Image (tube, rainbow, N blue to C red):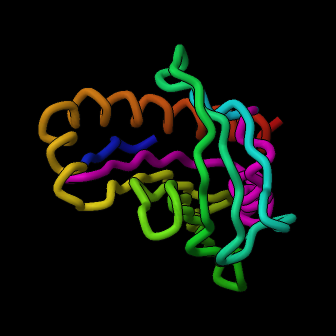
Amino acid sequence: MTGAGMSALGGEVDLFLRAAPEKVWDLVSDVTRIGEFSPETFEAEWTHGATGPAVGARFKGHVKRNGVGPTYWSPCTVTQCVEPGPDGRGLFEFAVGLDGNHINTWGYRLEPEGDGTRVTEYFRLTPSWYVRGYWMLLGRLRGRTNERGMRTTLERMKAVVES
């Protein structure tokens, strides 16, 4: 795993998985499986008629903040959905929040590498004044929590695809 990186309003973690990009895609784009991997989002379901990943598809994630609470549902909308093509690259990204008022964006970039796939999970906060204020006060702490969670998520995915 390479080092995590935090930007002004986000962060990312990457990990090499010894699996084809298509196999990794099946995990990162199936939101109904997130409970197997994430330490905070313990379930998710497609909503508003969506049945799978596509730009504009909506789902809701059931979150237990910091793994202990509070517990709440977060509405999400898929913003980018690029299945791995001949070059092996893929991208699955979704915005969290109500339409027109997204708080942050989460995503997975897939890059073929040798006999497997390098997966990068990332998050970016929407640069509104109130989010910038939150990040100034609690950003480092929350950023570290997100990085640990992303690392855990990717390591759990790795265990599934490499078993």
Tell whether position 59 is magenta: no
Judge from the rendering whether residue 136 lies leftward or rightward of residue 71; answer left or right: left
Judge from the rendering whether residue 8 lies leftward or rightward of residue 111; answer left or right: left
In the image, is residue 158 above or below residue 120? above
Tell whether position 9 is magenta: yes
Spot occupied by residue 149 in the image (x, y as percentages of width and height)? 49, 31
Judge from the rendering whether residue 6 lies leftward or rightward of residue 37; answer left or right: left
Spot occupied by residue 162 in the image (x, y as percentages of width and height)? 77, 40
Identified at 34% across, 42% down, the residue is 4
Identified at 56% across, 67% down, the residue is 111
User: Can you tell which quarter of the image residue 139 is in?
Assistant: top left
User: Which contiguous range is marked in magenta?
Assistant: 7-35
Point out the image quarter for the C terminus.
Answer: top right
Identified at 79% across, 56% down, the residue is 46
- For the residue pair 13 and 71, the one nearer the viewer reads as 71
Spot occupied by residue 122 in the image (x, y as percentages of width and height)? 44, 53
In the image, is residue 89 above or below residue 60? below
User: Can you tell which quarter of the image residue 81 is in?
Assistant: bottom right
Q: How many numbered tags mark residues here?
A: 0
